[in-house]
Amino acid sequence: MEIRSVNSRFLDLAFRIPDELRLVEPALRELIAAAVQRGKVECRVGFRPLARSEADPQLDARVLAQVAALARRVAEALPDAAPPSVGEILRWPGLLGEPASAEALAPEVLAAARAAIDEFLASRAREGDKLAAFLRERAAGICTIIEPLRQRSPELLAAWQARLVERLRAALEQTEAPVPMEETMARVRQKSLPTGCASTSPRSSRGSWPTSTNCGASSTPAVRRASGSTS
């Protein structure tokens, strides 16, 4: 038995089971659904009946008891009758047994399913631990890169604001409409405060600035160019 899965938002079970064992599918579905909450899961069950030449002969005790009882009754009714030979008894229909039915194999299939589920969950846990370690390593690397920039954030922000103010001043000087220059510049400086990881950003008229993250880095605000005239 083999269980595989890929990531999925919901639990999606698919089974590939021989027709001889199809009746155990509901029990398998119940077992897997109890252990797995999400993912596209595929369960494959392999089954190959042994040929008579490969299987060890097994006497059916029930049939053998029936043959013995019949032999005793014949001996009582016909004392002079010869008893059946071993070869004749072995050729009795059903004495050597028939291949195990699906009902008889169901407990073994479910036992194999429980073992496969345990291994599947353990494999998932190992993969999750590796992924978590990878993400922590990358997060630590990002914070290492951002820390020098965080220390230079006042300098970088001041330079960015200066460039923005100069570009806006040049645009305002070209318009003929009366525009309060200093008031406009003050509003631009107020709106160009850092976002992202900044923890001391003041509250604007539209709500709170984002709270800080562990690394304490500030992201550079995007510049949106206004089309048409400036007011």
Image: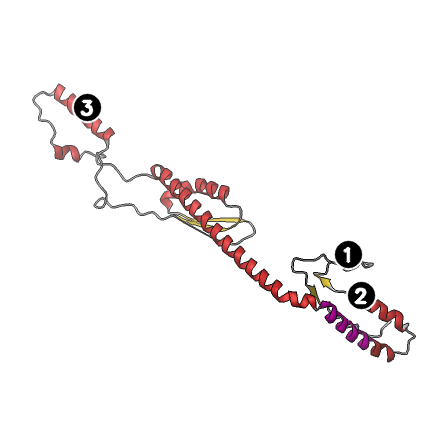
Of badges 3 and 2, nearer the viewer stands 2
Q: Residue at x 77, y 60 (%)?
A: 201
- The x and y percentages for residue 203 are 80, 57
- The x and y percentages for residue 229 are 84, 75
Q: Residue at x 74, y 64 (%)?
A: 194
- The x and y percentages for residue 44 are 40, 49
Tell me the SS state at disc 1.
Answer: loop
User: Callout 3: 10 Å neighbours few (<14), some, many (20+)?
Assistant: few
Type of amino acid under label 3 = Ala
Residues drawn in magenta? 153-168
Q: Main secondary structure of the magenta part?
A: helix
Type of amino acid under label 1 = Ser
Q: Which residue is mark 3?
A: 69
Q: Which residue is mark 2?
A: 191
Tell me the SS state at disc 2.
Answer: helix
Among the two numbered marks 1 and 3 on one chain, the one whose residue lies closer to the N terminus: 3
